[in-house]
Image (spheres, helix red, strand yellow):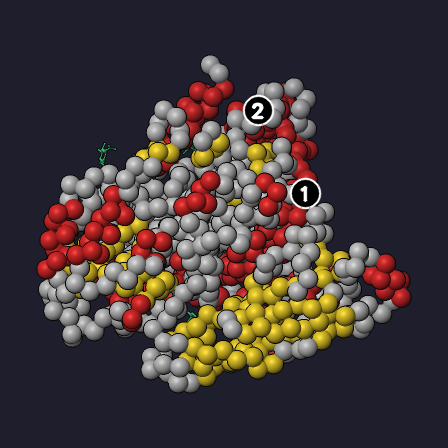
Amino acid sequence: MSSQPRFLFFFILHFFLLITCIHCYTIKKPNSQLQYPCLHPRHRSYPFCNTSLSLKTRAQSLISLLTLDEKIQQLSDNVSAIPRLGIPPYEWWSESLHGIATDGPGISFNGTIKSATIFPQVILTTAAFNRSLWAAVASAIAVEAMAMQNVGQAGLTFFAPNINIFRDPRWGRGQETPGEDPMVVSAYAVEYVRAFQWNYDWEAAKKDKYKFGLQRRALGDDNDDGDEDRLMLSACCKHFTAYDLEKWGQFTRYNFNAVVTDQDMEDTYQAPFRSCIQKGKASCLMCSYNSVNGIPACANRDLLQKARSEWNFRGYITSDCDAVATIYENHKYTKTPEDAVAAALKAGTDINCGTYMLRHMKSAIEQGKVLEEEIDRALLYLFSVQFRLGLFDGESSRNQFRQLGPHDVCTSEHRKLALEAARQGIVLLKNEQKVLPLDKHGILSLAVIGPLANSTKLGGDYTGFPCNPRSILEELQEYVNNIYHATGCQDAPCNSSTHFSEALSVAKQAEYVIVVAGLDLSQETEETDRYSLLLPGYQTSLVTSVSLLLPGYQTALVTSVAAVSRRPLILVLIGGGPIDVSFAAGDPHFGSIIWIGYPGETGAKAISEIIFGHYNPGGRLPMTWYPESFTNVPMTDMNMRADPSRNYPGRTYRFYTGDRIYGFGHGLSYTSFIYKLVSAPRKLSLQESIKARRWRNMLYQRGNGFNYVYVDEVPYCSSLRFQVQISVTNNGDMDGSEVVLLFSKASKKFKGSPERQLIGFERVHVLSYETAETSFLVDPCEHLSFADEHGKRILPMGDHILISENIEHIFSIEI
Ligand SMILES: *[C@@H]1O[C@H](CO)[C@@H](O)[C@H](O)[C@H]1NC(C)=O
Ligand SMILES: *[C@@H]1O[C@H](CO)[C@@H](O)[C@H](O)[C@H]1NC(C)=O
Ligand SMILES: *[C@@H]1O[C@H](CO)[C@@H](O)[C@H](O)[C@H]1NC(C)=O
Ligand SMILES: *[C@@H]1O[C@H](CO)[C@@H](O)[C@H](O)[C@H]1NC(C)=O
Ligand SMILES: *[C@@H]1O[C@H](CO)[C@@H](O)[C@H](O)[C@H]1NC(C)=O
Ligand SMILES: *[C@@H]1O[C@H](CO)[C@@H](O)[C@H](O)[C@H]1NC(C)=O
């Protein structure tokens, strides 16, 4: 059998297990003392149970008691029990991306808890640009996770968040991420991990520290791990790294080699992971399926070791599920499976999600390719995390949550928070002549058309069983009695026009028409990238793997309905990835366009409230909406920076200058806001920071007429932090929230410098005709720098421009 079919078989088997896991997992017994080896009288005397010893000593002591076979059994997500030491089995793989999901075998909904709150998919929650909201959502998910764990339906180690940069609009998993901007993704990662692992509002804590004037070297360089030793739950920064392609032509995530420059690595791909580990202090890192510059990520020693040595990572490294197998089977990076498990273990992969290490580690040792000490090192990290989670002695920061159970899942509080997240995230893209909001008292009839209008599957991927999902149609019925409905298309793929006539006749009858169009998981998800950015209706030829653009029936439906409706149409778009709706953006038949991502189980209520003006939308797009022509760019090209010499347009608002349907940060409100700069410095001098003459000489000698400093040569950069204050006045008669985005750019163009980059964001609530002030703390080394071609961060001297809406403020950095 060639490796390919064998691997496929393995995958199919795995997939089968995944799908059927609710059948093959019986309910585990509720937590009892017997589950903790150290609470058992017979095992209490082992040194690994002695809480006066350090975690490291305890873990080492435990390792010393294990046989080689017992050790190898630990190298899978599905860990067998060690009865002689009282150690129960453990499943490392649970999922919690935007609510407790069924995708990992650690979760079961077959028990007293039958459902869990489905929050909006991450891309929509991100669009709220509200750190407290992000932390609140992660805390609520953690509460539901602990409640499920308490009744034996979940583990304690979760493989979330997904913090890869949303690099290409076609990516099927872009929906799972916090978008395309490294600063936003980093901020989301920190909030999620802190709140999930410790129930900790990092942003609030950070503000407190400034208030009390505590000086720190840089934000989050916080090395007192005292309170962080114990974990409530474990979160995982994934997928490390440069992973953002599922399937494009002959390339799949299992065989793709991401070729990434040092420059892009530093200021795009790695930035969120650095934050997730340094500031978020995540206890898990997951290496990805793809190769990075020729080396499979899970065998990439330089990458994995850098996380430990430079970022002070203290957790465990897991492979993505079956990623160790891909080293041999798909990347063909090694000659044998034994070499693959050896390469992964030696590089720093501690555990293999899947069974590859279980099956091949013994022979790798027999062939002398792996030393037992190398397994011991991996076990040290694995056991340390299990100790921190209290799996041995029941002692953890989860103690105060022991009582959580079925009553703490799907609570009205959590469902309200899910609703709030959808409200805050939904983005009003277009609103000509103030078609929205509708006045519910003034409406005689409403047509609600589209294949997704009556769908209750609004969670996106990584979704479990929702508590009580409702469709947009159902929610709109709460506002208007006289509603006509037609699907127009049988489903999202919409491959025929058979149902158009019904939709058109319904549209003609009604006073107002809402069409709910867009994507579902048949178009974009894990293993599925899109080939087109248009509304569905195209097909991929199975023979050539090339996309053939057939008539776009969803587009045809939407435009023909718009042509017959009495008033400008309201278009509601579902989906995680951007959609080329240029046909509607510029056409006066379309009054409003609203993007709702995958808004979760209460999202239908949120969009209905927005349509009828019970909530004033304020979300902003966390990614660029490219035109269909962008699909000419090879999805495999990882370069962020444009290259005119080969017609390469670059990616994301930081580097792409081509046409866009809607830009990063776009989003309207029912009111309007006026911005004013309250204060910002005109000049910044590095004199104070760089006192030593030695440094100054180096700086003066550098550059061809362009002066810059390497940020790691500026010893006291944090002392140069400055405030930018902006006031926002609500110039309308409706209260609303405004997301204030602060960008910067160096006024001189330097090779590889971004067009602009986000350096701060703050969501502020402003009452009608009132003014609110917000301030940003700018750290020049962190925020105004970018990477040079060698991947070293440089801070340009001279003029920088701070940009927020119509504000442009020039200030200069001097030596
Ligand atoms: C749930 O568990 C029970 C008892 O273990 C089992 O009989 C039943 O088939 C399971 N149902 C599902 C849907 O897995
Ligand atoms: C636990 O470890 C401490 C420190 O080494 C030692 O003094 C103590 O005797 C140990 N306790 C038990 C029960 O072995
Ligand atoms: C997990 O391991 C146990 C014991 O080895 C085995 O019975 C079970 O089938 C495994 N589960 C999965 C999902 O592989
Ligand atoms: C909407 O879907 C629900 C549940 O599937 C169904 O009962 C209802 O009839 C549908 N409504 C319309 C108007 O089709
Ligand atoms: C259209 O969709 C239906 C159901 O989704 C499917 O059965 C049919 O094969 C599709 N037709 C084409 C031409 O793809
Ligand atoms: C941010 O989210 C929190 C939590 O939902 C909420 O209380 C707060 O009002 C939001 N801020 C703004 C400005 O909307």
Q: Amino acid at mark 2?
A: Lys
Name the residue tied to disc 2: 332
Left or right: where 385 falls relative to 449: right
User: Can you tell which mark lies on residue 362?
Assistant: none
Residue at 80%, 69% in the rendered image: 815
- Tell me the quadrant of ligand 3: top left
Dot 1 beta carbon under 8 Å from ligand 3? no
* Element under disc 2: loop
* Element under disc 1: helix
The furthest residue to the top: 1
Residue at 60%, 70% in the rendered image: 802
Left or right: where 6 falls relative to 300: left
Residue at 36%, 76% in the rendered image: 671
Residue 716 at x, y = what percent? Answer: 76, 67
Residue 485 at x, y = what percent? Answer: 14, 55
Q: How many marks?
A: 2
Within the image, what quadrant is residue 810 found in?
bottom right
Instruction: Answer with mark 2 or mark 1, whichever residue precedes in sequence.
Output: 1
Residue at 47%, 59% in the rendered image: 664
Name the residue tied to disc 1: 305
The furthest residue to the bottom: 770
Q: Nearer the viewer, residue 769 or 277?
A: 769
